[in-house]
Amino acid sequence: MQSVLFPLLAALAVLAGYLIGSLSFAVIVSRLMGLSDPRSYGSGNPGATNVLRSGNKAAAILTLVFDALKGYVPVLLVLKFGPAYGLEEGTAALVGLAAFVGHLWPVFFKFIGGKGVATAAGVLLAINPWLGLSVLGVWIVMAVVFRYSSLASLAAAVAAPLLQMLIWDVGPELPAIALMSLLLIWRHAPNIKKLMAGTESKLGQKSAPVPHVPVAKSHRHEQSRAHKSSHKPKHPSK
């Protein structure tokens, strides 16, 4: 009976992880706090770093915390209650990967999500707290020294599977960690180009609002003025 029930429970756990990961807290928190949609300014990325560009630190912190929790909590629940139903570390890692994928392609937000740094950190902290803290340390050091969130995230993504292999066991969680790292690096492709071009914005740099120039309206207004002037009655010369 358990052999039949296990695949179903594992599939349901992975699906639940994906749905939880699909909650884009950058958008949710911004809406609740009356802020602009983070997809409409800065990098357009619905994540804590871009929310920080709005100038509201509280919103950025809340986004960071909840994005991390949606990766941490599902994995922790599987690790704590899953063994009684045959769900071990491998399933927990898949659930974490599903939450991460949900953040990247959220079903509730037209599959347009963020880069997944905070969610990946939450997953790592649940799978292996020491690994999570080590990777977080890499991110903090890189961010403090270079002031680029994207560069710090890339360094952390590279460090995660390497640290897992070199310091801890190569277990069933390693493929999920490696895949998260590869996806995270891939999602940062535009940032890599900006870093190489020297145009990447630094941490805490407030995003200037994009000026709205009603080109079409102005064009119609000029046409209207020209049309009116062409129909003005001409006074006969005396």
Image (spheres, rainbow, N blue to C red):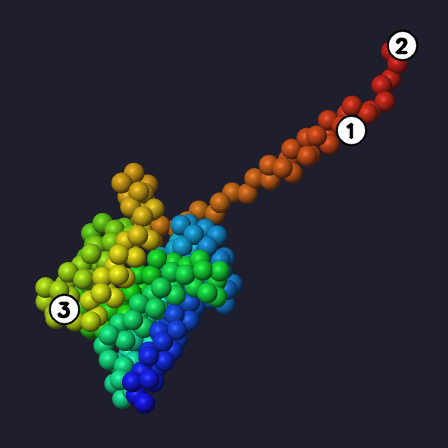
Relative placement, left or right, of 41 versus 148 is: right
Quarter that holds the N terminus: bottom left
- Name the residue carrying label 2: 238
User: Whole-percent x and y of residue 121?
Assistant: 27, 66
- Other residues around mark 2 within 10 Å, as few (<14) / some (14–19) / many (≥20): few
In the rendered structure, find residue 62 and report the number of the disc placed on it.
none
Q: Quadrant of residue 172?
A: bottom left
In the rendered structure, find residue 228 and report the number of the disc placed on it.
1
Check disc 1 and give the amino acid type: Lys
Residue drawn at point x = 10 percent, y = 64 percent: 166
Question: Which badge, 2 or 1, is on the more N-terminal residue?
Answer: 1
Q: Quadrant of residue 19?
A: bottom left
Look at the numbered disc 2 and give the secondary structure of its residue. loop
Camera-nearest label, 1 or 3: 3
- Name the residue carrying label 3: 170
User: Whole-percent x and y of residue 119?
Assistant: 32, 66
